[in-house]
């Protein structure tokens, strides 16, 4: 299929689902190819440097969320984990100015939920009436309000960075996406330049859902938590207590655990939606007429013919396989080839770094009266979401003090 990639348009499929071409307010979700190309290029060349700010933010955010008390406290996973990962992603996408801003973190999550809801409601309306529905449906009015509010928060940051970039000799301590767009000379006014930051932060909310499922699985499989903690301690001792990209790459049990978590509960059961822009005939004779919308099913992830006991959580299933963020034709949770997720390695390192801090600094378990999470997730429209009603007990581990300052 890779050789026929040019025959299928992602943009047209996104427009069908999210109406980005008909309603200007949804333009941030069109994923301009120039932005995606720049993002992927920078992440590939400067991964470690770009992640330094994120790595600095993780322990700060954890301390503010859960503190240093050795007394058990009850916390809602559905509130804490998406907030934690949204804050880490915001450090990269919008920098220090907004990553600690609760209004920004809240509004990006509201935009994500609102976008899905508004698109579903619009699809229930006849095509020719959608412009009217867009103006008057409550869900559509809310998404317009949320987008305007989000852009009003990020636009001043973009303007401030533009002024700084004009100063001779200016160099950011840790570059973020706002700096990148100043450097590539993104066209348009400040509002247009603010769109990519909103777009990327919205896209990153999927990381929060992944991390929520990770915590669900750790809470329901305490033996896995112990296994991962031992691995982290062994690798950190080898690297003199320093958490580097090289150290994170050595966490093979963690890679396997994360791949298994995403296998059982991917983002959606059907992915890679595309529209054929010309007639296509595959090598096996399958014919796709021009104008046909196609997508890829992920039901093979739960097929016993492919995975032994496919519906059973096996944290070491992928122990001898590639890293968590590696894409393959057999497992398309990251996409594949030219369509592979540009931020998958950022996601992998950010998730693994967060887990290193959490496993060594805290001990946690499901509260006795908590909802029991399902490793397969829960259906939500055309997506799969992690159980967000679970409650955990958490406290600081004192034995971690020797490894962390």
Image (cartoon, rainbow, N blue to C red):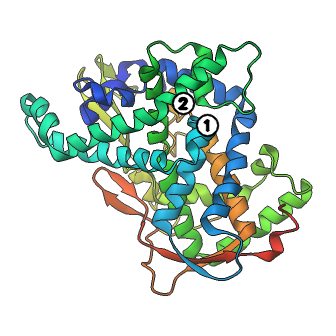
| Quadrant of image for the N terminus | top left
Q: Give the secondary structure at mark 2.
A: helix
What whole-number distance in Å separates the C-alpha atoms at marks 1 and 2? 9 Å
Q: Position of residue 159 (x, y in %)?
A: 53, 23
Q: Is the residue 240 above or below the residue 45 in the image?
A: below
Q: Is residue 127 visible?
A: yes
- Tell me the residue at 64%/56% (across/down): 61
Q: Nearer the viewer, residue 178 or 358?
A: 178
Q: Nearer the viewer, residue 83 or 169?
A: 169
Residue linked to disc 2: 157
Q: In the figure, is residue 242 to the left or right of 220? A: right
| Label 2: few (<14), some (14–19) or many (≥20) C-alpha neighbours in 10 Å | some
The numbered disc on residue 223 is none
Q: Is residue 286 visible?
A: no
Q: Position of residue 256 (x, y in %)?
A: 65, 57
CB-based contact (under 8 Å), mark 1 and mark 2: yes
Residue linked to disc 1: 95
């Amino acid at each position: 299929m890779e050789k026929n990639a040019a025959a299928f348009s992602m943009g047209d499929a996104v427009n069908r689902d999210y109406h980005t071409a008909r309603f200007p307010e949804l333009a941030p979700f069109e994923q301009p190819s120039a932005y995606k190309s720049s993002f992927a290029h920078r992440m590939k060349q400067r991964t470690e440097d770009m992640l330094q700010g994120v790595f600095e933010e993780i322990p700060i955010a954890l301390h503010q969320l859960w503190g240093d008390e050795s007394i058990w406290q009850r916390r809602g996973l559905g509130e804490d984990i998406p907030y934690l990962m949204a804050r880490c992603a915001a450090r990269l996408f919008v920098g220090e100015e907004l990553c600690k801003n609760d209004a920004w973190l809240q509004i990006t999550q509201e935009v994500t939920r609102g976008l899905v809801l508004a698109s579903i409601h619009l699809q229930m309306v006849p095509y020719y009436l959608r412009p009217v529905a867009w103006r008057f449906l409550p869900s559509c009015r809310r998404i317009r309000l949320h987008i305007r509010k989000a852009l009003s928060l990020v636009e001043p940051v973009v303007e401030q960075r533009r002024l700084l970039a004009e100063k001779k000799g200016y160099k950011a301590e840790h570059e973020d996406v706002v700096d990148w767009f100043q450097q590539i000379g993104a066209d348009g006014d400040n509002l247009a330049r603010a769109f990519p930051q909103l777009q990327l932060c919205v896209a990153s909310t999927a990381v929060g859902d992944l991390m929520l499922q990770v915590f669900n699985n750790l809470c329901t499989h305490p033996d896995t938590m112990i296994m991962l903690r031992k691995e982290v301690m062994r690798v950190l001792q080898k690297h003199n207590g320093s958490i580097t990209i090289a150290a994170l790459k050595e966490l093979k049990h963690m890679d396997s655990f994360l791949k298994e978590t995403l296998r059982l509960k991917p983002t959606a059961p059907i992915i890679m939606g595309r529209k054929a822009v010309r007639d296509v005939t595959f090598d096996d004779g399958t014919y796709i007429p021009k104008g046909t919308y196609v997508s890829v099913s992920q039901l093979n992830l739960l097929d016993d013919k492919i995975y032994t006991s496919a519906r059973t959580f096996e944290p070491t299933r992928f122990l001898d396989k590639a890293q968590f963020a590696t894409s393959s034709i057999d497992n398309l949770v990251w996409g594949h080839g030219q369509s592979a997720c540009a931020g998958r390695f950022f996601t992998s390192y950010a998730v693994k770094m967060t887990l290193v801090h959490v496993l060594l600094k805290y001990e946690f378990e499901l509260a006795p009266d908590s909802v029991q999470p399902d490793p397969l997730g829960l259906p939500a429209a055309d997506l799969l979401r992690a159980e967000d009603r679970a409650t955990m007990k958490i406290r600081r581990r004192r034995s971690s003090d020797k490894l962390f300052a």
